[in-house]
Amino acid sequence: MLQISTWKRVVIWGFTALILFMAVPNLFYGRVESHNDAIKQIDAAGETPELAAAAAGWPSWMPSGLVNLGLDLRGGAYLLADVQVADVYADRMNGYWPEVRDVLREKRDTVGSIRRVDGPADELHVRIANPEAMAEAIAAVREISRPIVSIAGAGSNDIEVRGQGDVLIVSLSDAEKTATDDRTLRQSLEIVRRRVDEAGTREPSIQRQGETRIIIQVPGLGSAQELKDLIGQTAKLTFHGVVSRTSDATAEPGPRNFIAPSMNEAGTYYILESDYVVSGEDLTDAQPSFDQNGRPAVSFRFDPTGARKFGDYTAENIGSPFAIVLDNEVISAPTIQDHIAGGSGIITGNFTIEESTQLAVLLRAGALPAEMTFLQERTIGPELGQDSIEAGRVATLVAFVAVLVFMALSYGLFGLFANIALIINVGLIFGLLSIIGATLTLPGIAGIVLTIGMAVDANVLVFERIREELKTARGPSRAIELGYEKALSAILDANITTFITAAILFALGSGPVRGFAVTLGLGILTSVFCAIYITRLLIVSWFERRRPKTIEV
């Protein structure tokens, strides 16, 4: 006999109602989106009458999760960036110099005096006074090498050491370069994501492509140039001792020094010490603020290590200038008036409020480990996104209506039950997309259209099985029960294999492929749920009320 206990009915309808309730905000997309944006701005900058009015546009007790629209539906900015991973090699060599210097100084009795000399950016060249002791110097430096922490470089060391005349040469091993390239790209991905998130943009897509490239898609952004301005800078902040100031751009800086232009004074250049005192990596916070004259500035705070180094340097160099350098340009070069303890300070310059805010965002997010060059850039207008939405809507409606008509004509009353379940199924898909915060793209709409076509497959299997059971002169109750029992294995087999395909697409794909896989996978889950529980519950409820002697499927 057909029987579904009361508690099962309550659980099924309760679960369905909850998911459909979560999908409701998508019916009022504009109002809910304005409400969510206003709440974020109130949390970040405080409440204003305009923000309060926007926040009140949607009840606080209602869910506010939305299906985010992707770049092809909303419009926005697209960039393909290539990370110059080789730039990191020079920084690695500069970082090795103190260790190499200390090791060779311990061998001064045999090696003699040492001096770093110029060489290729990815190599460290050290001239020793006693070339006969080169073998001993090489052995000493090799002792500071470290094993590479990666599967590909297992058993290898991070540096290679060799001699050439009286010059000892240190370089990264090939395995370490490969590992460094991978770390550089991963770090660049994370920093780009943090910068975009700091700017408050909605649902960006930031993905790795190949060995050195990154795809960045930000829906709703006005232009690709705006996105480039946000992420294109390395934002490398350093503090250097000042050797001198000059107006000659071709002046010789001298050994272990470099020349940098002033950001605010045209024609002014500073000769600075190459070794910085502290860097942006020591920062823990940076916020836009105002200086004592009310001009826009950026306040910063160092971590304990950076605060100690900065405090020691200012205590030892009172009366001397020091330069604040951003991406090899001197923001300002104040004179140290007193010991600066506490690890906090302020960066002043000819900033606008927007510039100081953007600089604070860049410094908080951290410095890109390497420069990025942009190979492709596109700005997709919102009208193109709207065209995509309309095309997707038409395709969905056509598929939806065609399936409804087919089921009604093919299976009569049972087809109507399947149609009700299909409508609920689409609502469940959008509810789940809202809950997980998924981004809907044009391929995602294709996944929903495909799901609509596939959703009735399970019902077709059940109804055809019921027809077969009715031909054996079984009663309608027993026919319905056996129809569901015997069709269950076929339903599960078909949908599990399709779900595995969707999972593989999600794991191995990227961008649009993942969007298609997400909607297809969720559609399979909701389709099976509706076929096994919703349609069956509707049929059982009808059967209990009417108690028909015969049924037509």
Image (tube, grey):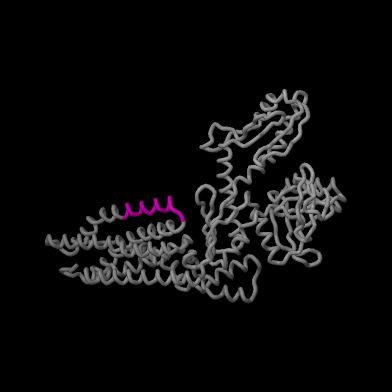
Q: Quadrant of the C terminus?
A: bottom left
24 displayed left or right of 79: left
Q: Residue at x 29, y 65 (%)?
A: 535
In this rendering, the count of numbered labels is 0
Is 316 within the magenta?
Answer: no
Residue for point 56% across, 32% down:
156
Q: Which residues are magenta?
A: 495-510
Q: Quadrant of the N terminus?
A: bottom left
Task: Say which residue appears at 74% left-offset and 32% top-offset.
Answer: 127
Is residue 308 among what the camera can see?
no
Q: Position of residue 22 (x, y in %)?
A: 45, 66
Residue 474 location, quadrant: bottom left
Name, please, the residue furthest toward the front. 250
Report whether 357 appears left or right of 522: right
- The majority secondary structure of the magenta stretch comes to helix
Estimate the x, y position of residue 353 in percent, counting from the top left.
71, 67
Residue 211, x across and y down, in percent: 52, 47
Q: Is residue 128 above or below residue 532?
A: above
Residue 43 visible? The answer is yes
